[in-house]
């Protein structure tokens, strides 16, 4: 209960304009509505307690980590975290993980990564979802990833050809079987609206896992301890 309360207060402090962190886009700060002074003053009374929780160290970032195309270290981690945790929660192999860059709001710079940093990285209270798709839908999904120049994906490897199609596609080092069912981990927001990937809509089956994606990322980064700018060529 307290964890959810602190998260709510932290988000309210940001939305009220009380955040001391520099926005990624300085123009955004110019356009941001002026905070209500009474609400801001009330929220400020909670700041010491919120800061004490949100300043908890989670990991150490060794390199600047950004989302990039066709793949980037931060995007790879974001997708891996979904797939690995889904497998742990379901106690079965999960073939793929995918999420759009629009689900995230910041990138990481070298230094100590705090709990507050992770909540700003993923500010939405989404939960983990696992979808079941047939092989032909998986191919369609990866072609949609290729069409946007790449996205955070886990479990797949392919190259983007001149027509922005996924070529040489392998899922877990195997050619996709058109008649096989594949498990795909994502967030409920991506599963509900499709994001840039409408192949995720109308799956053969859907499992909603009672696990916050925010907490999932906290656990993943904490488990890694040190975060490096490492890529493996999963999308080329």
Image (cartoon, helix red, strand yellow):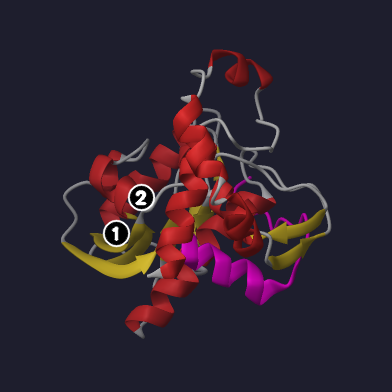
Q: Is residue 50 above or below residue 141?
A: below
Few, some or many residues within 10 Å of mark 1 (<14, 14–19, 20+): some
Closer to the camera in the image, 28 or 54: 54
Few, some or many residues within 10 Å of mark 2 (<14, 14–19, 20+): many
Residue 219 is left or right of residue 175, and the answer is: right
- SS at circle 2: helix
Residue drawn at point x = 59 percent, y = 60 percent: 49
Look at the image and tell me whether residue 166 can be seen.
no
Q: Which residues, given as a range, are shown in magenta?
A: 214-236
Residue at mark 1 to residue at mark 2: CA–CA distance: 6 Å
Residue at which label 2 appears: 139
Residue 140: x, y in percent? 32, 45
Closer to the camera in the image, 16 or 224: 16
- SS at circle 1: helix
Q: Is residue 8 above or below residue 30?
A: below
Q: Quadrant of the C terminus?
A: top right
Name which quarter of the figure residue 211 lies in.
bottom left
Q: Are marks 1 and 2 in contact (CB under 8 Å)?
A: yes
Task: Determine if the magenta segment contains residue 53.
Answer: no
Residue 107: x, y in percent? 67, 43
Closer to the camera in the image, 25 or 4: 4
Q: Which numbered tag is attached to residue 135? A: 1
């Amino acid at each position: 209960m307290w964890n959810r309360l602190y998260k709510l207060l932290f988000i309210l402090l940001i939305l009220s304009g009380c955040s001391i962190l520099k926005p990624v886009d300085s123009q955004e700060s110019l356009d941001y509505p002026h905070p209500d002074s009474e609400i801001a003053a009330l929220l400020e009374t909670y700041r010491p307690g919120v800061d004490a929780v949100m300043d908890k160290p989670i990991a150490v970032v060794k390199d600047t980590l950004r989302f990039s195309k066709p793949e980037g270290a931060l995007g790879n981690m974001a997708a891996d975290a979904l797939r690995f945790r889904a497998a742990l929660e379901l106690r079965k192999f999960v073939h793929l993980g995918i999420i759009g860059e629009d689900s995230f709001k910041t990138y990481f710079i070298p230094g100590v990564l705090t709990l507050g940093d992770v909540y700003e990285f993923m500010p939405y209270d989404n939960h983990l979802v696992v979808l079941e798709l047939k092989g032909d839908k998986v191919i369609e999904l990866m072609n949609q990833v290729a069409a946007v120049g790449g996205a955070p994906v886990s479990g797949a490897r392919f190259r983007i050809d001149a027509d922005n199609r996924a070529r040489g596609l392998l899922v877990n080092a195997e050619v996709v079987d058109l008649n096989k069912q594949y498990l795909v981990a994502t967030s409920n927001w991506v599963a509900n609206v499709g994001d840039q990937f409408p192949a995720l809509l109308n799956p053969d089956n859907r499992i909603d896992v009672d696990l916050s994606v925010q907490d999932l990322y906290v656990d993943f980064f904490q488990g890694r301890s040190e975060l490096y700018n490492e890529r493996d060529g999963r999308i080329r």
